[in-house]
Image (cartoon, grey):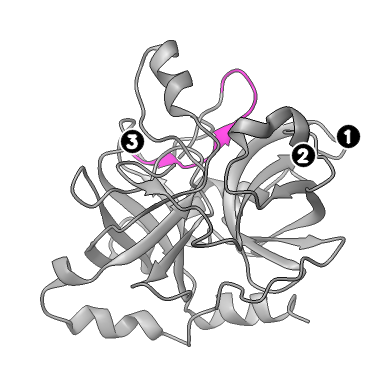
Amino acid sequence: MKKSVLSLVLVLVLLISTFGVAYAITDGEPDGEGHPYVGLMVADDANGNPLWRCSGTLISPTVFLTAGHCTEAPAARATIWFETDVQSNQVALGYPYGGSTSVDGTTYTHPQFNPAAFYLYDLGVVVLDTPVVMPVYGQLPALNQLDALKTQRGKQDVTFTAVGYGLQASFPDAVAWKNSSLKVRMVAYPKLIQINVPGYGGDFSLLLSNNHSTGGTCFGDSGGPNFVGDSNVIGGVTSFGKNGNCAGTGGVYRIDRADDLEWLASFMP
């Protein structure tokens, strides 16, 4: 793993380098053109060397929302693709170095982000050099919008829509890992397990299901959106997992708090 802060908390970042891994959609289905504003991001250092891959959401023509651990140093720049299937056309698309359809940008990380406790302010953006014009973008939530879920009965019926380009499963052997690491935009519909989780970000956090019934997130999905219901409102970004098999529950960093919304507003046109 890229880092491990809590004993069973795994950062959901998939490193391109030999030793790193991180979190993709499990037990999901191909997204197709369901969420064309969700993209695959490769972070680069100042010399243009690829570091790791994440997912994220375009929230304006020039602002791509992702996780803080996806934009932290030594990341300085990023390249992003919005094709639904990067896997089948990696050579033509220039992955991971960029190509004719990719866009580049500068990375920024929440000012209170701390790698030693990344789950507290796990928020980052990429400001694109060239605008990407789409008819619809991901939408930021209203202030404290998710607080209503604290008192809602039947949390098992509260559904989110998780989207990302991560692994479809996590296995220990190299052959199985290769076959599950397809760079394809996938979607799943996890259920709310817990909100405001002590020890995992407190009132900045959500725990969502990650099982064969609902699907969930895995390595490479870090930074990807967890939309509220079937809307395009981003409740939070995929942040961490609680085991190396991408099963059980997945951690989400809420972005409906005042400091997050104010920081994101500073980048919006």
| On screen, residue 163 above or below 192 | above
Q: Residue furthest left?
A: 154
Mark 3 is on which residue type?
A: Ser
Identify the image quadrant of residue 203: bottom left
Q: Secondary structure at mark 3?
A: loop
Query: Which residue matches tag 2?
Result: 44
Which residue is rendered at x = 33% and y = 36% of the image? Answer: 7
Left or right, residue 11 beside residue 64:
left
Marked residue nearer the N-terminal end (2 or 3): 3
Q: Position of residue 167 (x, y in %)?
A: 44, 35
Is 17 magenta? The answer is yes
Is 217 magenta? The answer is no
Q: State which region is magenta.
A: 8-19
Q: What is the distance, in whole Å, between disc 1 and disc 3 at their CAs?
A: 33 Å
Mark 2 is on which residue type?
A: Asp
Q: Are marks 1 and 3 in contact (CB under 8 Å)?
A: no
| On screen, residue 266 above or below 227 | below
Marked residue nearer the N-terminal end (1 or 3): 3
Q: Secondary structure at mark 1?
A: loop
Specify the label residue 47 is tagged with.
1
Quarter of the image that includes the C terminus: bottom right
Q: Secondary structure at mark 2?
A: strand
Left or right, residue 63 beside residue 155:
right
Q: Position of residue 103 (x, y in %)?
A: 80, 52
Mark 1 is on which residue type?
A: Asn
From where the camera sits, is residue 48 visible?
yes
Q: Are marks 2 and 3 in contact (CB under 8 Å)?
A: no
Query: Which residue matches tag 3?
Result: 7
Q: What is the distance, in whole Å, between disc 1 and disc 2 at their CAs?
A: 8 Å
Viewer-nearest of discs 1 and 3: 1
